[in-house]
Amino acid sequence: MCTICGCGTSVIAEHANSEQHGGTAHDHDHPHRRAHHDHDHAHNHPHPHKHDDHHHERADGPIDFGKGRAGMHVAGMSQERTISVERDILSKNDAFAATNRSRLQNAGVFALNLVSSPGSGKTSLLVRAITDLKEKWPIAVIEGDQQTSRDADRIRATGAPAVQINTGKRCHLDAHMVGHALDHLSLRSGSLLFVENVGNLVCPAAFDLGEAHKVVVLSVTEGEDKPLKYPDMFAAADLMLLNKSDLLPHLDFDVSACLAAAERANPRIRSLTVSARTGEGLAAFYSWIEERASVVPDSAS
Amino acid sequence: MHEVSLVESVVALVEDERRKQGFSRVRTIRLKVGTLGHAEPEALRFCFDAVTSGTIADGARLEIETVPGAGWCSRCHQTVPLEERFASCPLCGNVHVRMTAGDELRVAEMEVE
């Protein structure tokens, strides 16, 4: 199994029946977990890895006694040595994210990564936003869920193309998965791309996908202290959408306390109170998008 | 629990280093993990053996050096300890403290043979 993208457990489904993708070649080189080449991809597409970049040293390769620090072998003495690495653990993901980011910028695509706990209303918000904005921008969506293509089905019902990534046991999207998904979308210059991450207020904060901005969605049924309990996510986001504002009359939710908590976790965060159900506050969200999307280079011009 | 993915990333880095530096066995992997970051040392330890099983890092010992949080207080003009990512300065109460340490997540070094 490829452990970077989870090929074999994760499924990228282009179609409503979540059939596994076939036919589209993607070209990448990523490290495989085992020295021997035993990954069993569940999908059956051509897979032109740059095999020269793969390590194929086998456990049955030559035993080289000259490779130790001493450069020679003395019976009874170990060649153990300490090597300095000093590399960020997420450097591999960050490299894939940088590739995605330049690919999106070169294509003139403005990408947002929507993160939240499950049930905050991300998909409903997207369905509403696509309906309101589709005359103005071409819009595409990458959906991340552990299982099912239900969210992608809801998006496709609006007419927008959507790719579903099923992450299997994984609790977040990573940049490599998103790179695969981009292969399945033909994005026109000037498009908006929404990436709906797996519902999880912890793990997706750590993984840059190559988006222009992370947008954290918090619903008023969740409690105003969430930004203090899960500061990493709010620190990573540039915008907080406080959703389900139509329910406020029925709740004790303190909006100003919530906004203060978000600003404490991230002094630069912008916050908008919205309702995907009634449309309240969404015009401000669309303006926020428009201001930022307009600076993405238009590759067609 | 994204620590599984993080340990898989560690294994990928170890594989990279093996290609560059040539070794056949990893005895110890030393990580630096900031106390204000998103990775939990206990969770990393919990999944380390399972994730590294059958890889180049199989059987390696995991050592984690935790890096305490610190920040630069613009009012005190000095580095102060930080208990939380968004904590105020413990000396003067200033809320504008720029975090300078505590979100590390690095493979520092390895003992190999």
Image (spheres, coloured by chain):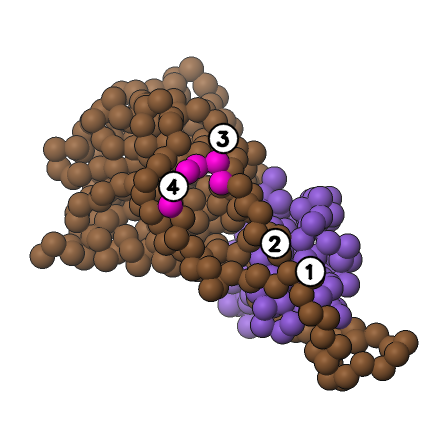
Q: Nearer the viewer, mark 2 or mark 3?
A: 2
Q: Amino acid at mark 2?
A: His
* Residue range (magenta): A41-46
CA–CA distance between discs 1 and 4? 29 Å
Picture residue at 36% right of the left edge, 58% below the top: A99
Chain B colour is purple
Mark whose residue sits in front, 3 or 4: 4
Q: Identify residue for label 2.
A: A36
Classify mark 1: residues with Cα within 10 Å, few (<14), some (14-19) or many (20+): few
Query: In the rendered structure, which disc, 3 or 4, sits on the residue that comes first in sequence?
Result: 4
Query: Is residue B85 among what the camera can see?
Result: no
Q: Secondary structure at mark 2?
A: loop
Callout in the foreground (3, 1):
1
Numbered disc 1: secondary structure:
loop
The chain that appears brown in the image is A
Read off the residue under disc 1: A59
Marks 3 and 4, how far apart at CA: 22 Å
Q: Alpha-carbon distance for marks 4 and 2?
A: 21 Å
Q: Are dots 4 and 2 on a single chain?
A: yes
**Residue A129 visible to an observer of this rendering:** yes
- Rendering coords of residue A199 (x, y %): 47, 32
Q: Chain of mark 4?
A: A
Give the amino acid type for the residue marked by disc 4 in the picture. Answer: His
Residue A2 lies left or right of residue A62; in this view the side is left
Q: Mark 3 belongs to which amino acid?
A: Gln
The residue located at (35%, 37%) in the rendering is A22
Q: Residue at x 61, y 39 (%)?
A: B1
Percent x, y of residue A113: 37, 43
Q: CA distance from mark 2 to mark 3?
A: 28 Å
Displayed quadrant of residue B11: bottom right
